Amino acid sequence: MATGAEGQMQRVDYVGTGLGEDQLAATPFEQISRWVEEARTRQQEQGDVPEPDALSVATVDENGPDVRTVLMRFLDPRGPGFVTNLQSTKGRQLVARPQVAASLTWPSMFRAIRFRGVAELVDRAEVKDYFRQRPWGSRISAWASDQSQPVAGRLQLETAYAEYAARFPDRGRPDDVPVPEHWGAFRVRADRVEFWAGRVNRLHDRLVLARVGGGGLDDAASWAVSRLQP
């Protein structure tokens, strides 16, 4: 729903293709991968999914819930993952309370995937492998930004960037910039995955896969399927 120029609510009927039990993939990982790839393809072909890997991540601390959007940088049968400064707000929150919720949302496709579970630190070797694939400028910013901390102004941030750029010049090698000790990644080990598909008349499809075993997202026996009313 949106507000028009004269303040009237503009209603949009969700004309998605839906998701029936007979269309659901054999495992959560297969279904997640299918929808992610379809979102990426749609962005390439139609351009109306600006950031297919945008992942909203919700945490909690002594002040209550907190949410932000990051980019999904890992996806395998263990779960989706994202990188961050481990000393950032979300990093400290997840270390103290690993309970986490996350969602991938594609409004133009009338689709979303919701995850609930716990956050686990990604192995340091995986973090290093990913870090070396990042553009040089992104590797420099990981050093320059004291994520979530106050800053006097943009000049301070740009000055720090320039200092680290001079310290670690771009020579076109993956090891030009070392991985900061404070930089890492979390993976969401889900206990519940919901596939939401918008349908006309607000009769949306909501298929939930709940963990009933210890296997990964690629182990069909570890998940039970149920449908929720919209």
Image (cartoon, helix red, strand yellow):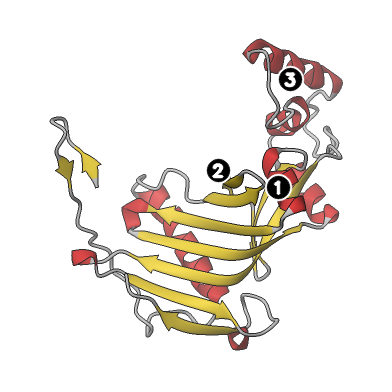
Task: State how far apart marks 2 and 3 are (Cα).
Answer: 24 Å
The mark closer to the camera, 3 or 1, is 1
Q: Which amino acid does label 3 sit on?
A: Tyr
- Counting from the top left corner in percent of width and height, residue 89 is at 69, 39
Quadrant in which the C terminus appears: bottom left
Label 1 sits on residue:
93
The mark closer to the camera, 1 or 2, is 1
Label 2 sits on residue:
68
Q: Earlier in the sequence, mark 2 or mark 3?
A: 2
Q: What residue type is labelled 1?
A: Gln
- Counting from the top left corner in percent of width and height, residue 182 is at 82, 39
- Counting from the top left corner in percent of width and height, residue 73 is at 64, 51
* Relative to 2, 179 lies left or right: right
- Image mark count: 3
Identify the secondary structure beneath mark 1.
Answer: helix
Task: Let me know if residue 164 appears in the view.
Answer: yes
Task: State how far apart marks 1 and 2 are (Cα).
Answer: 13 Å
Q: Which amino acid does label 2 sit on?
A: Arg
Q: How crowded is mark 1: few (under 14 residues within 10 Å), some or many (20 or more)?
A: some
Task: State how far apart marks 3 and 1 are (Cα).
Answer: 26 Å
The relative height of residue 215 versus residue 152 in the rendered view (above or below) is below
Q: Residues within 10 Å of mark 2 (few under 14, many from 20)?
A: few
Label 3 sits on residue:
161
- Counting from the top left corner in percent of width and height, residue 87 is at 77, 39
Q: Earlier in the sequence, mark 3 or mark 1?
A: 1
Q: How crowded is mark 3: few (under 14 residues within 10 Å), some or many (20 or more)?
A: some
Quarter occupied by residue 164: top right
Task: Let me know if residue 72 appears in the view.
Answer: no
Q: Depth check: 70 or 127 in front? A: 70
